[in-house]
Each structure stands twice: as structure tokens, then as C-alpha cells.
Amino acid sequence: MCSAKVVILLAAVAVCYGAPNAKFSKHHLNIDGGNNAEIEDFPYVASVQYCPFACTHVCTALIINENWVLTGANCIASISAQKVDVGASDLTQDDKVTVDIEAEFIHPDAPSDGFGPNDLALLKLSQPLTFNDKVQAAKLPKQGQEFTGIANVTGFGNSKFSVRNDLRTARDVTLISNDDCTKAINEIFPDVYSNVDEKSNLCTLSKTANSCDGDLGGPLSQDGTVIGVVTWHLKPCGYRGIPTVYTKLSNFMDWIEKTITENK
Ligand SMILES: *[C@@H]1O[C@H](CO)[C@@H](O)[C@H](O)[C@H]1NC(C)=O
């Protein structure tokens, strides 16, 4: 399924990273080992919805301002997402607010399937969001800012067996260097080529919780500032001690501001 980038271990365990097939990398499980989260604690979190018939969650996203949300390029590289849901801890409940997507702006240097360096896409909304205690813009880093220590990763990952679109967070994941990230991946999977990119990526490790499918596009936050957007992780999600990789927002602030300014 993921061509050269799938490793089969013990017959049933597939590791898919870097450039997984979009279908393979979504629609299963949710943040693995994490805690339930309330939207009031993460009011900048949104859901990107694909609506061929009924709408389904495809990726997590974050609110940049009243008119824009940010997600992974991988989330919309192979589908045409139509709507964004905001303001709900559980996407199956009626209290969410749904807004149409007017236009998509994939980072010009993102790989064609989105996975890899520069994995970001800005979505322009057809009407402005109304901010309240459940709907707020994310606080973003400054261009060039560096972060270490611990952070939280939050997302609306699906359940494997049912539509379980509730918000969950993996608390206290540890930021590690990209070298340590590559080492951690290769310790477990020696033959896997890791394309963790120094400029583009951040990496975290956790012994207790990991990002999982449906969390792609979701925020890595530290003390209220969103510092990363989930780009890829190794599968299956239940592996402890393997990294999750993010797009490092502090290296993309100029692109975000420029894209928004030029497309008002
Ligand atoms: C993670 O989230 C929890 C719950 O909202 C919060 O108390 C904690 O400060 C957050 N940790 C970091 C590092 O931002």
C-alpha cells in the first residue's frame, strides 16, 4: 500500500511513514494513550471535513484567524475537503459550527502527496468565524523561534471501530532533536529511511501516548503556543517509544503571513 515505505514486521505490523497512501494513514484510531480534552482548553482546534455524501473528519486543523485555518498539505493532497467544524469537543454533537472552505493554499514546496517537508496548507473560509470561549485563534510562535522541553499534541482522531470524533490530547510528549528522532526510528526500524528535515520538522517522543490517524494536521502546543502541526507518525500507533513528526511552525510564519496577506 505504501510501496517502498511499508515495512512488514511479524506479518501484521506495517510501518508506514514519509509518504503513506492517504487512505492508509487516516480513518483509524485516535490519539493513542491520551486523555479526553475539552475544546475550551484548545479552542483553536478545528476539524477538516470531506463531504462526498455525509461529512466525515479527515484531519485536525487550527484556527489562524476568523477567516483562515491551517492543516497538513497531506490532508487535502488527494481529496477535496469542503468544510471545517469548530467549537466542539465531540464532532458528532450539534453544538459545533460548520463553515465552508472557499479556497485552499498548499505550501508550494510540499511533496505532491503532502507527506514530508513543508507539509502545510492554509484553508480560506467562506465566512468569518465568530470567536467565543470555544472558538479562538491559535497563538503562534515567532519566525525562527526555537522550543525544547515538553508539549501537548491534540486531535480528533477517529476510532478504528466507530465514528469517535472526540477531542483528545497526549500530554507531556518530549521534544527531541531531529538526530535523536532519526536514531529512535532507526533503532526500531533499521531499514527505514527517515526524511526528518532539519528546517521543516519537529519531533517528539512519548512512552505513554502518541498521535494517531485523524490527528494529522493537529497542533503540538507548549504553554498555549502552537509550535507544530502533525505531519506523520509510524504505524501502528500503539508502539511506545517511537517518534511523531511535526511541521515546525516557527519556520513557516513568513509563508503563513504572506499567503493570508496576498489572498484577502
Ligand atoms: C497540556 O495540557 C494540559 C491540560 O490542558 C495543561 O494543563 C498543560 O499545561 C499543558 N502542557 C503544556 C506543556 O503546554
Image (tube, rainbow, N blue to C red):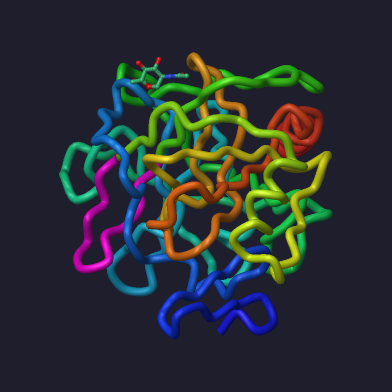
Q: Is residue 155 above or below residue 12?
A: above
Which image quadrant is residue 161 in? Answer: bottom left
Percent across and percent down for residue 95 are: 19, 37
Q: Residue furthest top?
A: 223
161 in the magenta segment: yes
Residue nearest the viewer, comparing 244 with 68: 244
Q: Please tell me whether the stretch drawn in magenta is mainly helix, strand or loop.
A: loop
Residue extent of the magenta highlight: 155-167
Which image quadrant is residue 36 in? Answer: top left
Q: Residue furthest left?
A: 93
Q: Residue visible at 48% across and 32% down? A: 173
Quadrant assignment for ligand 1: top left
Q: Is residue 121 above or below residue 222?
A: below
Query: Is residue 109 something one can see in this rendering?
Result: yes
Q: Quadrant of the N terminus?
A: bottom right
Residue nearest the viewer, comparing 177 with 223: 177
Q: Residue visible at 27% across and 35% down? A: 35
In screen coordinates, is 39 left or right of 221?
left
Residue nearest the viewer, comparing 208 with 27: 208
Q: Residue visible at 57% across and 70% down? A: 16
